[in-house]
């Protein structure tokens, strides 16, 4: 097995990225509006995928960052979301942060209008964002989960994907034998026994250009434990305990 520096990162088509993500991401699902996929290759084989695309609700993201020395928020096309990151167990330690660093350099070079990356860590079932912190992301929000529903049979539904994507809503309604309805309410799912996933969602932002600055406070990483949001590989483990055990870095989401 080679070292992290030997990993080759290059753009791959969706038809290659999708089956890998479904096989290796904890959710088993892809984000339908992902547009840019980086493959991570070592010893001639694909061992990781990072997928980027527009956020589902850009209006809430735009005010978070502005161009330096102006009062204007960045534009609609000046950020992307890292919405899936999946790696297998073949890659050596520190591979995830190495791959992110290379992906950011490629984005800066080939899409210089992109000023920042946003991503969310699912501390209800995956982790609190160890990799994001290692890759230089800034923590900007820790909040109790109100974005993921767990159905009685265990299926996890991302509310934004459900309410904003007709095909996803149609699939869920067909699966559970309920009529498709208009609007953003999830009450019919709650009525049939769905519950909000217990835990937290953490929001991270990576500034790619020096002319941008956060418009929300940067939160110290110590507040993750103070909020009770610590999670690593699906287990509620405080960051302080993890550091004592010297755990290797894990996949964020």
Image: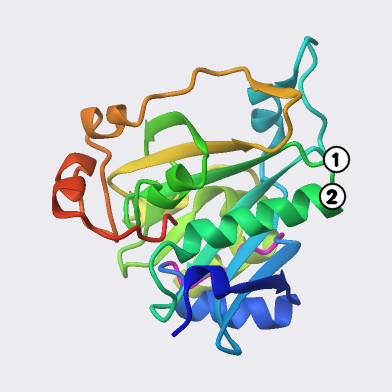
Principal secondary structure, stretch drawn in magenta: loop
Could you tell whether 195 is left or right of 237 in the image?
right
Number of residues whose C-alpha sits closer than 10 Å to that of mark 1, classed few (under 14), some (14–19) or many (20 or more)? some
Q: Where is residue 147 in the image (x, y as percent from the top left)?
A: 46, 44
Q: Is residue 177 at least partly visible in the picture?
A: no
Using the image as rendered, state which of residue 86 and residue 42 is in the foreground: 42
Using the image as rendered, state which of residue 70 and residue 106 is in the foreground: 106
Residue named by callout 1: 113
Number of residues whose C-alpha sits closer than 10 Å to that of mark 2, classed few (under 14), some (14–19) or many (20 or more)? few
- Quarter occupied by the N terminus: bottom left
Residue 32 located within the stretch drawn in magenta: yes
Q: What stretch is highlighted in magenta?
A: 27-33
- Structural distance between the alpha carbons of marks 2 and 1: 5 Å
Secondary structure of the residue carrying tag 1 is loop
Tag 2 near tag 1, CB within 8 Å: yes
Q: Residue 111, which numbered label?
A: 2
Could you tell whether 215 is left or right of 2 in the image?
right
Q: Position of residue 150 (x, y in %)?
A: 35, 57
Q: Position of residue 40 (x, y in %)?
A: 60, 74
> Does 90 appear above or below 158?
below
Using the image as rendered, state which of residue 148 and residue 89 is in the foreground: 89
Q: Residue at x 75, y 36 (%)?
A: 115
């Amino acid at each position: 097995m080679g070292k992290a520096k030997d990993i080759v990162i290059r753009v791959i088509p969706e038809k290659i990225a999708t089956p890998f993500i479904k096989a290796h991401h904890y959710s088993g699902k892809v984000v339908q509006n992902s547009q840019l996929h980086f493959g991570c290759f070592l010893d001639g084989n694909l061992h990781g995928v990072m997928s980027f695309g527009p956020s589902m609700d850009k209006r809430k993201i735009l005010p978070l960052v502005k161009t330096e020395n102006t009062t204007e928020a960045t534009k609609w096309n000046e950020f992307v979301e890292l919405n899936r990151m999946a790696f297998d167990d073949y890659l050596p330690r520190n591979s995830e942060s190495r791959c992110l660093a290379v992906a950011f350099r490629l984005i800066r070079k080939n899409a210089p209008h992109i000023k920042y990356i946003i991503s969310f860590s699912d501390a209800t079932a995956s982790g609190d964002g160890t990799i994001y912190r290692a890759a230089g992301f800034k923590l900007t929000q820790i909040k109790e989960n109100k974005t993921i529903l767990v159905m009685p049979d265990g299926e996890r539904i991302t509310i934004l994907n459900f309410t904003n994507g007709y095909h996803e809503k149609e699939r869920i309604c067909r699966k559970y034998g309920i009529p498709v309805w208009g609007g953003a309410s999830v009450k019919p799912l709650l009525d049939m026994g769905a519950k909000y996933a217990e835990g937290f969602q953490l929001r991270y932002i990576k500034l790619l250009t020096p002319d941008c600055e956060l418009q929300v406070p940067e939160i110290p990483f110590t507040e993750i434990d103070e909020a009770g949001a610590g999670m690593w590989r699906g287990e509620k483990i405080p960051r302080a305990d993890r550091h004592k055990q010297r755990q290797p870095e894990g996949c964020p989401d």
